[in-house]
Amino acid sequence: MAVGQTGVAGALAECRRRIAAAAERSGRDPAGITLVAVTKTVEPARILEAVEAGVREVGENRVREALAKQAELPDGLRWHLLGHLQTNKAARAAAAFDVVHSVDAERVAAALESRRPPDRPPLAVLLEVELTGLPGHTGYAPDDVAGAAKSVAAKGRLRLIGLMAMAPPGSAPEAARPAFRRLRRLRDEVQERTGLALPELSMGMTGDFEVAVEEGATMVRLGRAVFGERPLAG
Ligand SMILES: *Cc1c(COP(=O)(O)O)cnc(C)c1O
């Protein structure tokens, strides 16, 4: 048996070590990178282990699943919505989450804007950009991001903080690098064109987060690296 932490705490320590090493390789401060623990399909008891090991940022793909878990977990966590949002779920999402990474259409932004509860601060949002070119993937086309950014930034109940993307699935970590680099360059370009500040780049998952950190990720979204393999979707 290895000496030291095991289970979720040990896996988290290893993720943090790898994030720090990737940051140092690219001359970045590891403190500028947020680990979002992706808890979809994970039981509240195991999420609590992560919370006890210092996790405060948790990511879910579905509104209903997040609401069920929020009832069982302590206050003080920041809930991130990562999955595609249908406008008919926007009311619940606007109340349940602190950050939405997956704004991918004007109608979604408008629904979140109109449904964010007045007693909460503006909802932090990122625009999802479609860089895989594969069917079934959602997100803005790169050419549409500047216009969307202006529109979202003009909404008083939303606070636009950056861009999110997924790399093409199933590829080796190094194969994800061009997509991450493209997202960072797009962010720089959109900032330049619009004058808006877009500090956050949400990119990198279990299979490719070190490459994402090297390319400028400020939020990495880690599920399996923290909690192990998920059951296959039924
Ligand atoms: C599931 C998911 C993740 C985490 O994936 P892992 O490979 O388990 O790290 C990150 N982002 C999104 C949008 C996801 O759906």
Image: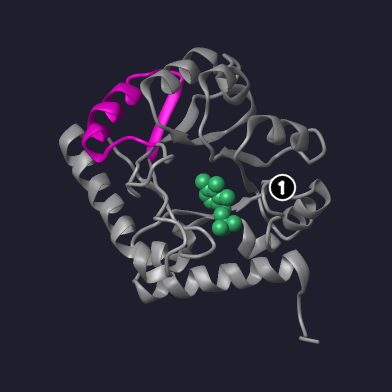
> Callout 1: few (<14), some (14-19), or many (20+) C-alpha neighbours within 10 Å?
some
Position of 218 with respect to 215 (left or right) is right
Question: Which residue is at a point 74% across and 50% down the rendered structure image?
Answer: 42
Where in the figure is residue 222, as x and y percent of width and height? 57, 57
> Which quadrant would residue 206 be assigned to in this image?
bottom right
99 over 213 or under it: above or below: above
Question: Which residue is at a point 79% across and 54% down the rendered structure image?
Answer: 46
> Which quadrant would residue 116 be assigned to in this image?
top right
Position of 28 with respect to 148 (left or right) is right
To which residue does mark 1 refer? 41
Q: Residue furthest left?
A: 193
Task: Tell me if residue 150 is in the magenta stretch.
Answer: yes
**Which residues lie in the magenta part?**
139-162
Where in the figure is residue 69, as x and y percent of width and height? 76, 38
**Most foreground residue, 192 or 183:** 183
**Most foreground residue, 227 or 216:** 227
Position of 55 with respect to 164 (left or right) is right
**Quarter of the image that includes the C terminus:** top right
Where in the figure is residue 182, as x and y percent of width and height? 26, 53
Question: Which residue is at a point 55% across and 21% down the rendered structure image?
Answer: 90
Question: Which residue is at a point 34% across and 71% down the rendered structure image?
Answer: 27
Question: Is residue 222 something that shows in the picture?
Answer: no
Task: Tell me if residue 33 is in the magenta stretch.
Answer: no
Label 1 lies in ligand 1 vicinity (Cβ under 8 Å)? no
120 over 162 or under it: above or below: above
**Quarter of the image that includes the N terminus:** bottom right
Tag 1 secondary structure: loop
Question: Is residue 154 something that shows in the picture?
Answer: yes
Q: What amino acid does circle 1 point to?
A: Thr
6 over 48 or under it: above or below: below
